[in-house]
Amino acid sequence: MFGRDPWGGPLEISNADSATDDDRSRDLDRGALMRQLDETQQSWLLAGPGDQAGKKKKKYVDLGCMVLDRKIFMWTVGTILGVGLFIGFVMMIVKLVPHKRPPPPPPDQYTQALHKALMFFNAQRSGPLPKHNGVSWRGNSCMKDGLSDSTVRKSLVGGFYDAGDAIKFNYPMAWSMTMLSWSVIEYKAKYEAIGELDHVKELIKWGTDYLLKTFNSSADTIDRIVAQVGVGDTSKGGAQPNDHYCWMRPEDIDYPRPVTECHSCSDLASEMAAALAAASIVFKDSKTYSDKLVRGAKALYKFGRLQRGRYSPNGSDQAIFYNSTSYWDEFVWGGAWMYFATGNNTYLSVATAPGMAKHAGAYWLDSPNYGVFTWDDKLPGAQVLLSRLRLFLSPGYPYEEILRTFHNQTDNVMCSYLPMYNSFNFTKGRHKWKLNNGRFTGGMIQLNHGRPQPLQYVVNAAFLASLYSDYLDAADTPGWYCGPTFYTTEVLRKFARSQLDYVLGKNPLKMSYVVGFGNKYPKRAHHRGASIPHNGVKYGCKGGFKWRETKKPNPNILIGALVAGPDRHDGFKDVRTNYNYTEPTLAANAGLVAALISLTNIHVKSGIDKNTIFSAVPPMFPTPPPPPSAWKP
């Protein structure tokens, strides 16, 4: 059959080609399978219908452990991210936007008093003052010390004046530096928290720099040291100007200032060694300076041990004002500090020698002054210091026996401070005690048995009691025994607080004995620099006496000075001419600073620094005691 092609050509339809579309399709598939497919064709064949139609997205997400609907999964992830971004944005705003923080709690009275007590040392500085000294009425003074003495001819500029005069007594000055260093070693974190660490370290260095000038600190062996600069004895009569005969500002001094040297002075040399050794621990991070201090301390202690004698012979200026009763306590005290500074067991052997303890008075329990820690008697402080060694390192044989003795005696001293044992009298005061069903109302402990100038002894006892309580706490010991009676460490702190509270105003007169602290305090301290106006006028040797005799308050406030203190009846006379009431001293303020820092209540780790003092001590492997002798029938 032929048909006509509409485009002009014939169209032939054959019967042979009349197969259906399905048949033709099957024939094409058969042919396709019989030939090799290229890669593109293979991909078409393997791909599903959906993939060929533009790869349609899957409706589910396979997380391995579960299968989630894709929409739910995307909404969940988006929500989490959105919430995270929102929280981060809010936190960023909170940090960037300024907001008021609650003010820190106000410092307690001990901290406030401590800031002032340290300023007293600034007022006592001799030599060229730093610009930041902070005492406006003080200036450079005594710039020719040592150089003007024809027998010495070396610079002794610097250091601290002792009290209301301008004498530099090296014996109490060295003890003061030892006390300040001890307080820093134990309570460094507290000093740092109240912003006084740099200040107190600067004061210590001011003192130790001067002490290094008083002997040949570069030598291993020395044969002399300077005992003091200036003279105060006026008992011999005459009109020779000196530091007590005249009443004038240190800045205006124009009279000679003799230098006193000693060639046999075990007490002074050992105390100076203690000061330099303790300071070397304070400055252990400054290796060069610390090593210099240790070297000087070694030379001093060696000199003191070889050249036996007291630094204050009868009739000397030293004997009149700061007489030393013996040097055995300094051997124990200095030996302990030398051991902590060097780790050398030789020094520990000296400090713990039974004969040394006996000569130092360790067994004089019936002495009326037993347990009274002063610039002259260091034994109570040395016993506390060596009890620390036993509590934390326990070196064992051959030191254990004497260390246990010192520890027991320290316990006895602490008992003697408590009013119920009647070792010392107390003034009537205002403090009420209630311990073990006993009641007692008392004020200031009379460690000097009613004699004048009591407060220097009071603050030292407060420091030892507070420090020892911290030792016991750090050693997980809740207290100590006085005979059969057990007392907690809080009892010691209560005693220490009662004494400092008395000093700071909790007394019958309601007077603070620290100048510048509280609303009522002494206005007429026995002090030349504070009593004479800083007005550019130079008042000569006798010209300043009109300021000494006047009843008007001092024109310059001697901030932080601890005056000598009241009498045994809680009475006090604010009279400039009576030094037994109103004169402050370097040694008294050192004890005050130590006691105050031990009781400050600040938000730092409480208690002591257990390890710093042992930084030079090597690990201990106690030597076992020798075996008993063989039994003989």
Image: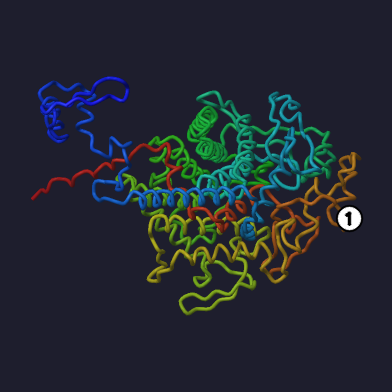
Picture quadrant of residue 4: top left
Q: Is 601 left or right of 405, judged from the image as shown? A: right
Q: How is the image coloured?
A: rainbow
| Residue occupying image coordinates x 82% and y 38% | 240
Q: Using the rendered image of the protein, determine whether residue 307 is visible from the camera's viewpoint.
A: no
Residue 71: % across, % down: 37, 50
| Residue occupying image coordinates x 70% and y 23% | 153
Amino acid type at circle 1 is Thr
Nearest the viewer among 289 and 92 is 92
Q: Quadrant of the N terminus?
A: top left
Residue 317: % across, % down: 69, 42
> Extreme left residue here?
633
- The residue beneath circle 1 is 550
Residue 543: % across, % down: 90, 44
Residue 193: % across, % down: 57, 49
Q: Is 40 left or right of 246, judged from the image as shown? A: left
Q: Using the rendered image of the protein, determine whether residue 115 is visible from the camera's viewpoint.
A: yes
Crowding at mark 1 (Cα within 10 Å: few <14, some 14-19, many 20+): some
SS label for mark 1: loop
Q: Is residue 502 above or below residue 238?
A: below
Q: How many marks?
A: 1
Q: Is 250 left or right of 335, judged from the image as shown? A: right
